[in-house]
Structure formats: C-alpha cells, structure tokens
Image (spheres, helix red, strand yellow):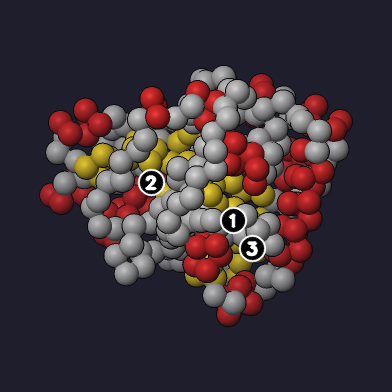
C-alpha cells in the first residue's frame, strides 16, 4: 500500500510539475561534514559550512503554485538519559535509493534543551488544530486528499515560505493527520528546510543529536509515453522506481532529478517516549501506521 501511495505521489508530480530538473551541488562543492549521508554512511561532524539562503520554494506537501517548482521546502524532548536510548543501531535503517537521512551526532551541551523547546512549541502549535477544519480555515491545504495515505499532510504555504529563510517552531510547514472514516486525527507536524541546507544549518534548527532529517533523492521522471511505469510494485520511474541513477535514467529516456523538495523532519509531540516523538521509522517509505 505504501509503495502504491508513493507511486501515486510520483505520478501527481509528473502531472503538476514543470519538467525542470534542479541541478544538485556536486559533492566536491560540499564540505565533508555537510555531505548528506546515505543509510550506510557514518556521520561527519567536522563541517564548518556557513548558512545558506534559499529562495522561498513550495513544500512537497502542496501542489504546484503558478508554475513554481515544488521544492526546497521551505522553503519543509527528553533528557540526557533518554538520548542514551536512541542509539545509532536503533535509529539507522535502510531507506532505499530514493531517500537520504542525516545521521546522529554526539549530544552537545544544550542540544536536549533546544530539542525540548521545539517539542513544546510543536505541541502548542498543533493543539490548535485538533479539529482539522480549523487547520483548513487557517490556510492549511490537504495534499492529495483523495489518495489513501498513512499520513495526510496539511501544508501552509505561508509557513513554507517562512521556513526558507528562518526556523520558527511555532509555524510547522505541515500538520500530520491520520484519517478515520471521514475525519482526521492529528498526530504530528513536519518542519522543512531549504534543499541546499548543509548539516550545520539543519543542526541549528533542530539538533542532529536528537532528530534525523530526510530528503527525497534520485528521482527519474518518465517520458510522456511511459508514465504508467511509475505505478505499481514493478515501477521503473518515480519515488519507488527501480531507476535511481542519472545514467540509467538517461538511458530510459527520463529526466533525472538528484533531489526533489527540501529537507524535512517529522515530530510527534503528543507521544511520551523520545524515540516515538522523533520516530525515524514513521518517516520511512515502507512504514505503515
């Protein structure tokens, strides 16, 4: 089911987005410590990259606005003993070739307090929207409301633009809901950051010793006559497709996008355990609630 959802999302992208690949920085231009790691990479903590400023793009949880490309997002608790519970082994998993994540850094003084403040702000911001109708009235838009999903993203365009240049934990880019019949149950929020953010930038928003941000990568958009191949368990194109390299995408006649959208992180502020509040598993493409 989750693969079908991602395939549907991919197909929607093909229909809504202008087919304009955004060139990714080459790895030679990114300091080692800022280089996003694949699941098998070890964390790098020696980066000294300076903050970047990105244009205010629209998050992936929203349809295309006036031909603007979707993506740079935005641009989309606990104590010291609790952190010990969140070992690398527990929070490191294979996200597949279309998703990358930051890896956990060592806990620094002040990290826990900063993360706690984010959770408090997230809970305060979310509580207002327990009734999803209030969220809609306040400008949040449902992404793909007619497609069955494990989590529905209600996105606020204004907060997405704000997140492009600054982080305000009281203004999550998206609210996360589970659908029960015709009603929606609020379960969390999503924060975003520009695509060109390095790891130090993300750490400034929410400490990387606590949270793991993710990004969607290696998307091969199909030629117009092969869009059906972005569907189903044997998809070749899209966010669940078997094609994940530029060479393979070029050979198939597709358009390769090294990274779509910006960086994202889910927070589930109503949970009690830190590993549930900052759940990596619930961000995984193969997770089913």
* In contact (CB < 8 Å): disc 3 and disc 2: no
* In contact (CB < 8 Å): disc 3 and disc 1: no
For disc 2, the marked residue is: 260
Residue at x 54%, y 43% (from the top left corner): 51
Q: Percent x, y for residue 237?
A: 27, 40
- Element type where label 1 sits in the image: loop
Q: Nearer the viewer, mark 1 or mark 2?
A: 1
Relative to residue 48, is residue 3 depicted above or below? Answer: below
- Element type where label 3 sits in the image: loop
Q: Quadrant of residue 151?
A: bottom right
Q: Which of marks 3 and 1 is nearer the N terminus?
A: 1
Residue at x 78%, y 51% (from the top left corner): 117
In the picture, measured across the screen, residue 106 lies left or right of residue 178, that is right
Q: Which of marks 1 and 2 is nearer the N terminus?
A: 1
Relative to residue 129, is residue 4 depicted above or below? Answer: above
Residue at x 75%, y 44% (from the top left corner): 115
Q: Which mark is residue 166?
A: 1
Q: Which residue lies furthest to the bottom in this view?
A: 137
Q: Percent x, y for residue 172?
A: 62, 60
For disc 3, the marked residue is: 171
Q: Which of marks 3 and 1 is in front?
A: 1
């Amino acid at each position: 089911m989750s693969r079908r959802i991602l395939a549907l999302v991919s197909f929607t992208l093909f229909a809504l987005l202008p087919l304009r690949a955004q060139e990714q920085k080459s790895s030679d231009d990114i300091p080692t410590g800022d280089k996003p790691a694949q699941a098998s990479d070890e964390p790098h903590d020696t980066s000294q990259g300076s903050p970047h400023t990105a244009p205010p793009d629209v998050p992936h949880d929203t349809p295309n606005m006036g031909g603007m490309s979707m993506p740079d997002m935005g641009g989309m608790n606990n104590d010291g003993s609790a952190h010990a519970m969140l070992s690398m082994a527990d929070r490191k998993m294979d996200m597949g070739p279309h998703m990358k994540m930051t890896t956990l850094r060592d806990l620094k003084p002040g990290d826990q307090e900063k993360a706690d403040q984010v959770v408090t702000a997230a809970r305060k911001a979310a509580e207002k929207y327990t009734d999803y109708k209030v969220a809609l009235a306040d400008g949040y838009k449902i992404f793909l409301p007619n497609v069955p999903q494990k989590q529905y993203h209600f996105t606020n365009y204004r907060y997405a633009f704000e997140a492009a240049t600054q982080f305000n934990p009281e203004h999550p880019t998206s609210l996360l809901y589970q659908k029960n019949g015709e009603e929606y149950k609020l379960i969390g929020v999503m924060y975003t950051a520009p695509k060109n953010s390095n790891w130090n930038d993300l750490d400034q928003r929410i400490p990387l010793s606590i949270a793991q941000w993710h990004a969607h990568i290696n998307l091969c958009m199909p030629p117009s006559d092969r869009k059906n191949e972005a569907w189903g368990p044997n998809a070749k194109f899209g966010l669940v497709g078997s094609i994940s390299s530029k060479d393979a995408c070029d050979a198939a006649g597709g358009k390769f996008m090294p990274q779509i959208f910006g960086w994202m992180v889910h927070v589930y502020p109503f949970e009690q355990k830190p590993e549930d509040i900052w759940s990596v598993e619930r961000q995984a493409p193969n997770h089913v609630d």
